[in-house]
Image (tube, rainbow, N blue to C red):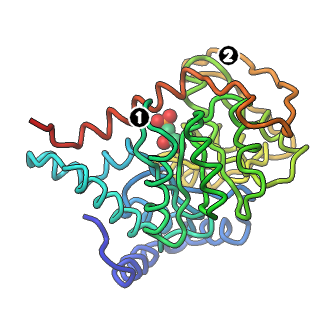
Amino acid sequence: MILRDTERVLVVERMLVGHNKKEGFLKVSSVLTNRPKTKLLVDGGDPEETLRIKSLIGFVDGQTTNPSLIAKNPDIQRRLASGHQLSEQEEKDAYKKIVQSISPLVGDAGVSIEVFADLDSRAAEMLAQGQEMFTWIPNAYVKYPCTHEGLRAAEMSVQKSIRVNMTLCFSQEQAAAVYAATRGSKEPVYVSPFVGRLDDQSEDGMDLVKNIKKMYEGGDGHVHVLAASIRSINHLLCSFFLGAELATVPSKVLQEWAAAGFPRPDKDFTYKAIDAKGKPLKPIPYKELDLNLPWDSFDLAHELTTKGIQKFVADYRSTLRRSA
Ligand code: G3P
C-alpha cells in the first residue's frame, strides 16, 4: 500500500524505530554518529521498503527509482495481478504518488525520478517530462539517459535550474560529456555508472567509478559520482573506498550490510574484482579526456546504454493496458 501523508509516515516510522532496541540500537547509533562520507540512497520503488531501511540504518540520504523498479512496486503489482493494466496517465499518477510518499523519508540527496524514454525519444519530449516531474516533489532529481538526446535534455534542464541525475552511464566518455553538458549548474549534477551491469559482461564496473573520479579531479566538482547497479557489500565498500559521493543500493544489500555490522573499508582495503563465480573481471583502462571539449564531441555510444533503455521500456510497457 502506498503511504498517504507525512503524518502516517511519521507514526509508522516511530513504531518501527521502537523495535530497534539493545544491540541493534547500539549499532544503528554508531552508524548514525559515524556516517559513511558516501551518501546512501535506496535503489527501489516502494515507500514501505524505504521506511524499513531507514529504521534499520537510522537514516536514508536519498532514493533512486526507475521504470523497472516502479513496475515492481507492490501496489502496482497488486493492480496487475487483479487484471488491471494501467493507462499511461494512471502509470504516471502512480509514479507521482510513489515518489511523493518517499520524498519526506529521505535526506538531502533527494529522490531521482526517471523520464519515460525509448530509443526514439527526443530531447524536447524528455525535457517536458522532466519539467513536470520536477514539480512533483521539492527534492526531485530528474533522470535522463546518457545518450545524445538525454544530454541535450540535461543541458537545457540545468539552465532551468532542474537538478539532474544522468543514468545508464557505462563509459568514461559519457561521464566526460555529462560534465561538459552541465557545466555551470548551480546544483550538483549526478552521474550514475552502473557497476553490476559491467560486471555482468566480465568487465570490472568498479574501475569505471575509479576512472570517472580520477578524471573529475581535474574539474570544478559540479558532477557527483553516484555508484549504481550495486549488487554486493563488496561493491558498496569499494564505493566508500573510492570516495564516490553517493551510492544507490538495493534494500537486500543494505540489509546484508546492516547484518554484517555496517562494515567500512580500512586504508589497506583491496577490492576483489571477481564475478559471482569467482572469475576475475577484466580491468577497464583509464583514458585521458579533456573535460573542456564540447560535450557532443565525446563518443556517447555504448551497447549497455541502449540495452538499458530497452529494458526500462519493456518493464514500463508490462504495466500498461494494450491499446486495441
Ligand atoms: O541503480 C540502477 C539499478 O536500479 C540497476 O540495477 O541490478 O538492474 O543492474 P541492476
Q: Nearer the viewer, residue 99 or 268?
A: 99
Tell me which corner region of the image, top left, top right, bottom left or bottom right, holds residue 164: bottom right
Q: Nearer the viewer, residue 220 or 61?
A: 220
Residue appearing at x 43%, y 80% in the figure: 14
For the residue marked with disc 1, what is the amino acid?
A: Asp
Which is nearer the eye, 65 or 35? Answer: 65
| Residue 116 % position (x, y) | 40, 44
Which residue is outermost to the front?
A: 124
Query: How far is disc 1 from disc 2 in space, using C-alphas?
Result: 34 Å
The CB of the residue at mark 1 lies under 8 Å from ligand 1: no
Question: Looking at the picture, how far across and down is residue 100, in whole percent?
Answer: 40, 69
Lateral position of residue 120 relative to residue 187, left or right: left
Percent position of residue 319, x then y: 23, 43
Q: Residue at x 59, y 70 (%)?
A: 107
Q: Which residue is mark 1?
A: 118
Q: Is residue 193 visible?
A: yes
Tag 2: amino acid = Pro
Q: Is residue 321 left or right of 121 when viewed as pictured?
A: left
| Quarter of the C terminus within the rendering | top left
Quadrant position of residue 273: top right
- The reply, left or right, for residue 249 in relation to residue 283 is left
Q: Percent position (x, y) of residue 108?
A: 62, 69
Q: Which residue is mark 2?
A: 280
